[in-house]
Amino acid sequence: MASADIPLGWLADLFQKARRPVAPLKLGGYIRGALAPATAQVLFSSRYGGFFQPKRADEAMTQPLQTPKSRKRSFSDDLFGPELPTGCTFHPKSLGLRTQMALLAAIQEIAHAAPLTKVLTKTGGYTSAAITNCGHAGWWSDAKGYRYETRNPANGMPWPAMPDIFLRAVSACVANTPWPNFAPDACLINFYEPGAKMGLHQDRDEKDFTQPIVTVCLGGDADFQVGGPKRSDKTSSIIVRSGDVMIMGGESRLYFHGVRKIYSDTSPIPEIKGRYSLTFRKAL
Ligand SMILES: O=C(O)CCC(=O)C(=O)O
């Protein structure tokens, strides 16, 4: 990097910090194999050390993550971040860089067989994020409405099989949660270019709401919003990053959520010019 870039990076860093929400963070989840109740208040600095580090789902495969702009998540982000509803747990840095690269390679194969596409929404427009699917069923939307299809309506082919690396990643993520046997039969892959977003919505096209939705983040940072059972409920905002995992289960399974913003040039994986989310579901 040319030295002239350094002050710009520093300014960008300050700018990003100034945007971060400041409010108490509830981290629900399981830390070092022990259950931390969903309501536990945890002192935690997620990316640059702190009071503890959660056990990474794939600890053996991890490498340090560095975002291109070296944007630090300050202490105050995590000590005074948003409250998440019961059942919605945030697992920062769950997947290491090597795993993320393997997930990306698998996505590229899936997208070769089932190209990413924007689909019609209920409101008559197209999704801002492009989507594709793998597994026994894929989420789809067109004039017939929102549903799961066992074949890709765009080309009539069965959806690509769920890659082994997806299944291994998701089972590592749920190992110490109330859903250790979560067996997704569908993975909806969203790709957000910078500027893309996803409005507040509920995931209610699946048959079994006792099973959670597990979302793996890959690429650029995003502002993830989660509210309550009603669209009008107050939302919390959390910055999710590559390798982070969000689980919405139990009480929060049908809570409204969405993605308000994708931060450009924040992906630790240069090939990803935007953000992927892999949302694992038990659909059928
Ligand atoms: O991209 C995300 O983090 C959220 C995705 C999502 O809400 C969905 O696919 O229903």
Image (cartoon, rainbow, N blue to C red):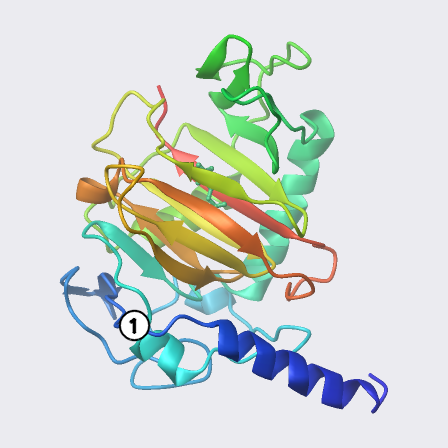
Q: Is residue 27 visible?
A: yes
Which quadrant of the figure has residue 133? Answer: top right
Q: Where is residue 59? Give x, y as percent.
A: 43, 68
Please say if 80 is above or below 94.
below
Q: Where is residue 223? Give x, y as percent.
A: 48, 57
Please say if 7 is above or below 99.
below
Please say if 186 is above or below 50.
above
Q: Is residue 13 left or right of residue 8?
A: left
| Residue of label 1 | 23
In the rendered picture of this protein, how many numbered marks are placed on residues? 1
Q: Where is residue 8? Give x, y as percent.
A: 74, 84
Identify which residue is drawn at 25% across, 37% down: 230
> In the picture, which quadrant includes the N terminus?
bottom right
Which quadrant of the figure has residue 271? Answer: bottom right
> In the picture, which quadrant includes the C terminus?
top left
Q: Is residue 103 left or right of residue 47?
A: right
Identify which residue is drawn at 36% across, 31% down: 203
* Helix, strand or loop under label 1: loop
Identify which residue is drawn at 84% across, 89% down: 4
Q: Where is residue 88? Give x, y as percent.
A: 27, 51
Which quadrant of the figure has residue 42? Answer: bottom left
Please say if 9 is above or below 250.
below
- Of 121 and 177, nearer the camera is 121
Identify which residue is drawn at 26% across, 57% down: 84
Q: Kindly identify the amino acid type of the residue bearing the numbered disc 1.
A: Ala
Q: Is residue 70 visible?
A: no
